[in-house]
Image (cartoon, rainbow, N blue to C red):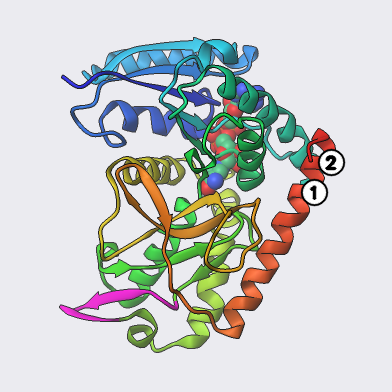
Amino acid sequence: EKSTLKVCITGAGGQISYSLLYMICDGKMFGKDQPVTLTLLEIPVVLDVVKGVILELEDCGLHLLKSAIATADPREAFDKVDVVLMVGAFPRKEGMERAELLQRNAGIFKDHGAIINDIAKKEVKVLVVGNPANTNCLIASTLAPSIAKKNFSCLTRLDHNRAVAQTAAKLGIPTCDVKKITIWGNHSNTQFPDLAHGEVNVGGVKKPALIALSDDAWANGEFITTVQTRGAAIIKARKLSSAMSAAQAICDHMRDWYFGTMDDNWVSMGVCSDGNPYGIPDGLIFSFPVRIKNGTWEFVPGLTFSDFARGKLDVTVKELMEEKSVAFEFLGVK
Ligand code: NAI
């Protein structure tokens, strides 16, 4: 039997975790033969909720789950962990400015990053989901200098999956026949969902996505805004943010990080921009197209941009630079 993987989930009493925990223990993230132990971190007032979720997990009888604990102590939660899924964050309240949300969360990710630095395994893989995800990830990584920057990522896979789903629906094809779609930049409404390098298979014939669609107005307009504002559309309808699809995207992200991507496709991940081939400034967590082998991601090289695309990239770069300066000023980090 494989040795047990130690996985920490923060915000374990929240909505996303409620969908996510079952998927992990059912083998959708690390495979059907990978046992896991879970350390579930919450704030003290939510600990009982997590204990209730653990009772449910027991009742599901999932053989991959070796043990699960609920804790409000990050030092217990991050001790010698192999994987951290940072889902917990302070939620955006009605009327709250983005800067205020940023500062509230900067404090959490600073503390957690520093503790991960001290006590997690050095080869730990960290995925930040809590918003603002890119900047929270940058903060955690900055406070964890003993862990490689490549081991920190943030979730833009939900946006990626949305972009694939929109394209597939427009062409009336299954999502597995849509490849090489990219989300660039921030997980916010400045993100740039990019179809320009996309490839599709329609009725057994492979084609560039833009040729198959033959609707540039849609590709450069409605497609982009639909993906950018999908989260808001779900909140409006459900009165709660996307949780099931976020959990699915977290599983997709981690599974691909562990098991790799196919040669004829790539995925979008928020990763450290240092040394990227596209002129994005270093020192950001930016969503790029990446390929993964042996647990290590690499930038997809050689893509070209139209002026339209360059303009979109500039907007999301600017927003991330601003978020970084607000967060780092607040933290007193250089
Ligand atoms: P939720 O509010 O249901 O759950 C968040 C949980 O985090 C709460 O139970 C809260 O008590 C906990 N928490 C807060 N501070 C904590 C701390 N210091 N330590 C441990 N736990 C803490 O929210 P939900 O729906 O589960 O979403 C979680 C986060 O993910 C939100 O920030 C949301 O905006 C973000 N999100 C990101 C997506 C992405 O694609 N990157 C997609 C969907 C949501």
Say whether marks 1 and 2 touch (CB < 8 Å).
Answer: yes
Q: Position of residue 248 (x, y in %)?
A: 38, 43
Instruction: Look at the image and tell me in which quarter the C terminus lies.
Output: top right
Mark 2, other Cα within 10 Å: few <14 / some 14–19 / many ≥20: few
Residue 287 located within the stretch drawn in magenta = no
For label 2, the residue is: 329
Instruction: Look at the image and tell me in which quarter the N terminus lies.
Output: top left
Q: Magenta stretch?
A: 196-207
Q: For residue 43, which quarter of the picture?
A: top right
Q: Tag 1, which secondary structure?
A: helix
Q: Position of residue 243 (x, y in %)?
A: 48, 40
| 34 left or right, relative to 47 | left
Q: For residue 102, which quarter of the picture?
A: top right
Ligand 1 closer than 8 Å to label 1 CB: no
Residue 200 located within the stretch drawn in magenta = yes
Q: Is residue 95 visible?
A: no
The residue lying toward the viewer, choosing from 299 and 208, is: 299
The residue lying toward the viewer, choosing from 249 and 30, is: 30
The residue lying toward the viewer, choosing from 101 and 112, is: 112
Q: Position of residue 162 (x, y in %)?
A: 44, 59
Q: Which mark is residue 325?
A: 1
Q: Is residue 113 visible?
A: yes
Q: Is residue 176 above or below residue 218?
A: above
Determine the residue positioned at 36% across, 68% down: 180
Q: For residue 195, which quarter of the picture?
A: bottom left
Q: Position of residue 286 (x, y in %)?
A: 58, 55
Query: How far is mark 1 from mark 2, CA to CA?
Result: 6 Å
